[in-house]
Amino acid sequence: MIKSMTGYGKAEAMLDGRKYAVEIRSLNHRYLEISLRLPGSLSSLETEIRRRVGERFSRGRIEVSVRVDTNGNMEEGRLELNLPLLKNYHDLLRRLKAEFQLSGDITLDHFTGFKDIFVPMEVDTDMELIAAQIGTVLDEAVRLLTEMRQKEGELLLVDLDEHIRRVEGCLNVIADRAPKCVQEYQRRLTERVRELTGGVDVDEIRLSQEVAIMADKSDVTEEIVRLASHISQFREMLKSGDAIGRKIDFLIQEMNREINTIGSKTGDLDISRNVIEIKSELGKLREQVQNIE
């Protein structure tokens, strides 16, 4: 079953005194892009979380947010002074003051503009345990996100099926109409020649040659067969459980190629109307396919 690229999942759990919360939202994107927000003290887990999420999705922008609230077990979010750096800043300011014989005292205001004077407090924690606990909550959030994407995919499937049925209906009209165009051309050509020759007998051989040339130039049988095959492939892809968004997008391009050729080969009004209708439906299909993983 196809899946949409848009969805949302959130999971929370209290494990060993820590409350973990993971939020995941996914948006349309041509490729897989993972955006991750982690507390600074958990930055070492970024690679593992990216790998874990990347294994579950193949397309879309996946935004992951991880929060950890603690009750004293983990000093998450607390800061401390970077004293070695502050002392270095202080020494530099004193040297600057002496070198240029500057007046005034060195105050707190001088230090607040410096970077990295406040750093996360280093706490002795079991990162393997925390990684496992985050993984448990992450898996649940991914499950909820996947469930939503599948539900939206079901709605997309209904819409895609409706559009492809219209394409198929118009193609059937074209397939039925195309052979009649040659017969009508032959009739019109015969009548026109007789009008111009004042009722003199028409050279049937020459007339047949002209009709044959026209029939060859306007023959769209191959295009109709290929387009019908593409429609069949489209339906098979919709039944697949794989990520098919890019494949379907390419298939729609091929459908457009065939219908454009049909439109250029024949000037029949009925066929032209159905060519326009098919191109309109293919445009709607392509727009919806951008939402499929």
Image (cartoon, rainbow, N blue to C red):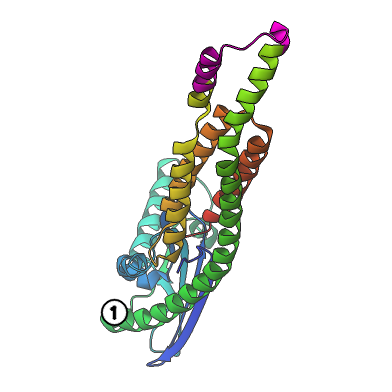
- Residue 228, horizontal then vertical, whole percent: 47, 48
- Inspect this view and state whether residue 235 appears: yes
Residue drawn at the location 55% of the way across and 43% of the way down: 175
Q: Main secondary structure of the magenta part?
A: helix
| Residue 262 vs residue 107, the one in the foreground | 262
Residue at 36% across, 69% down: 56
Magenta span includes 12: no
In the displayed structure, 268 sits above or below 39; it is above
Locate the N terminus by quadrant: bottom left
Whether residue 293 is visible to the viewer of this picture, yes or no, is no
Of residue 224 and residue 67, the one placed in the foreground of this image is: 224
Q: Position of residue 158 (x, y in %)?
A: 58, 66
Q: In terms of image quadrants, where is residue 15?
A: bottom left
Q: Is residue 234 above or below residue 214?
A: below
Residue 238 x, y percent position in the rendering = 46, 62
Q: Is residue 209 magenta?
A: yes
Residue 152, relative to residue 279: is it above or below? below
Magenta stretch: give its range: 195-213
Q: Quadrant of the C terminus?
A: bottom left
Q: Residues within 10 Å of mark 1 (few under 14, many from 20)?
A: few
Q: Residue at x 48, y 82 (%)?
A: 11
Q: Identify which residue is drawn at 38% across, 48% down.
A: 95
Instruction: Look at mark 1 in the image and give the residue it sits on.
Output: 127
- Total numbered circles: 1
* Residue type at tag 1: Met
Q: Nearer the viewer, residue 103 or 261?
A: 261
Q: Is residue 64 above or below residue 60?
A: below
